[in-house]
């Protein structure tokens, strides 16, 4: 039996970083860079007009009137050298003449018989996007550990990049145990309840972008459990097991895992809910066996599994941190174990919700936080500061 802090430490210590894989840009959305990316080109790649207007070459003697000598539009490949006092018609995104030293927006100009008159104050490189002003060739564009959000993906595309090296997403399987479990959509026989942990864990995973998920259901039978777990371990980076890890005569998960030569990292945490949680490692596969009670399973997912998955995909901020909130109701903590309480916060205060039983999800459905109370018997009073984990 370990403490909550020890369990968190062991989860993080046991979980490896995932493999690094060259991935097409779009498929890398929301993943983390495994390497710095250097710009393969200057951006912009040439001096560019930032306006529709006129590019000019001015000096102290030529500030107002310019002779129009050419036109350059976006996409043109012209290297028109200007003499002092000359101008070209130009459009946004077009390459400015190599020696032009300003672009005047067309709203501040008039043209008569090929002579441009400007009503603007000139300054060097006005309205010119200089070559490499955003980023120069070989400079670091994005650093290892940065998350590829849409802007980052767009930025890399502006540099012509099509693939990036990111930490690969894990392959995850959920193994659900229990003879009493009926599939929603079928009729409920006497003694049965509907199976809800698989879809609940699957949706929590999907919400964080983990899509490579399979689900297996197995009866409370030692041989069947061992067979299912063996396949699950062979084929996945993470195995999440629901139920069958407690001390009942028909709880076969622990025994089967050890028979399959799983290294036990810990079994049982001094916590409520979720005391019988198991963490193991089998070759490279990380195994979480969660108690079957739905609120226990989901609490364990938020507190332990979420940060393990974030570490695997190379998120530098993988550790789940607590945030202080002001308690809005009194609470009598009677047990010695650390507790996670379903709660709702508005940002400052936090309210403990009803139905704290580990078998109940009715108020968990409304919760956006889990209050974390340390080990030890204690009365908590309204107005005290408590630690919370935010969930979504
Ligand atoms: P166990 O951890 O297998 O002893 O199960 C603890 C409690 O959770 C029992 O009341 C089970 O019926 C219930 N339970 C187990 N697995 C599920 C599941 N997948 N969906 C809903 N309830 C479950
Ligand atoms: Mg069971």
Image: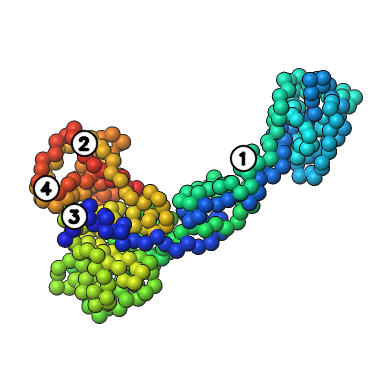
What secondary structure is marked by label 3? loop
The residue indicated by pointer 2 is 385
Q: Could you give the CA–CA distance between mark 3 and mark 2, rounded to whole angstroms?
A: 22 Å
Disc 4 to disc 2: CB gap under 8 Å: no
Badge 1 crowding class, 10 Å Cα cut-off, few under 14, some 14 to 19, many 20 or more, is: few
Q: Is residue 62 left or right of residue 369?
A: right
Disc 1 to disc 3: CB gap under 8 Å: no
What secondary structure is marked by label 1? loop
Q: Earlier in the sequence, mark 3 or mark 2?
A: 3
What secondary structure is marked by label 2? strand
Q: Nearer the viewer, mark 4 or mark 1?
A: 1
Badge 2 crowding class, 10 Å Cα cut-off, few under 14, some 14 to 19, many 20 or more, is: some
Q: Nearer the viewer, residue 392 or 181?
A: 392
Disc 2 Cβ-to-ligand 1 distance below 8 Å: no
Is residue 30 something one can see in this rendering? no
Q: Could you give the CA–CA distance between mark 2 and mark 1, rounded to whole angstroms?
A: 46 Å
Disc 2 to disc 1: CB gap under 8 Å: no
The residue indicated by pointer 4 is 376
Q: Nearer the viewer, mark 2 or mark 1?
A: 1
The residue indicated by pointer 1 is 134
């Amino acid at each position: 039996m370990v403490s909550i802090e020890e369990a968190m430490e062991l989860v993080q210590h046991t979980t490896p970083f995932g493999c690094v894989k060259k991935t097409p840009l779009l498929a890398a959305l929301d993943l983390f860079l495994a390497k710095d990316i250097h710009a393969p080109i200057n951006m912009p790649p040439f001096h560019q007009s930032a306006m529709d207007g006129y590019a000019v070459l001015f000096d102290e003697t030529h500030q107002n009137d310019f002779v129009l000598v050419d036109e350059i539009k976006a996409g043109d490949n012209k290297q028109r050298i200007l003499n002092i006092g000359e101008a070209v018609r130009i459009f946004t995104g077009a390459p400015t003449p190599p020696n032009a030293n300003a672009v005047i927006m067309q709203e501040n100009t008039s043209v008569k018989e090929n002579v441009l008159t400007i009503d603007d104050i000139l300054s060097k490189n006005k309205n010119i996007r200089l070559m490499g002003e955003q980023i120069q060739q070989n400079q670091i564009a994005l650093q290892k550990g940065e998350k590829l959000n849409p802007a980052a993906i767009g930025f890399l595309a502006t540099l012509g990049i099509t693939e990036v090296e990111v930490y690969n997403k894990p392959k995850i399987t959920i193994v659900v145990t229990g003879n009493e479990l009926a599939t929603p959509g079928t009729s409920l026989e006497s003694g049965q309840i509907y199976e809800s942990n698989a879809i609940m864990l699957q949706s929590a995973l999907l919400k964080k972008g983990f899509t490579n998920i399979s689900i297996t259901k197995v009866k409370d039978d030692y041989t069947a459990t061992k067979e299912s777990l063996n396949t699950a371990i062979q084929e996945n980076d993470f195995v999440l097991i629901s139920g069958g890890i407690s001390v009942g005569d028909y709880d076969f998960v622990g025994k089967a895992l050890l028979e399959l030569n799983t290294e036990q990292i810990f079994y049982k945490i001094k916590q409520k809910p979720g005391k019988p949680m198991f963490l193991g490692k089998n070759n490279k596969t990380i195994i979480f066996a969660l108690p079957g009670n739905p609120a226990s399973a989901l609490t364990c997912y938020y507190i332990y599994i979420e940060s393990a998955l974030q570490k695997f995909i190379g998120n530098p901020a993988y550790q789940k941190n607590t945030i202080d909130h002001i308690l809005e109701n009194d609470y009598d903590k009677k047990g010695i174990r650390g507790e996670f309480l379903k709660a709702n916060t508005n940002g400052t205060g936090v309210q403990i919700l009803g139905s704290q039983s580990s078998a109940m999800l009715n108020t968990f459905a409304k919760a956006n936080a889990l209050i974390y109370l340390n080990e030890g018997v204690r009365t908590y009073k309204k107005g005290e500061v408590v630690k919370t984990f935010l969930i979504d």
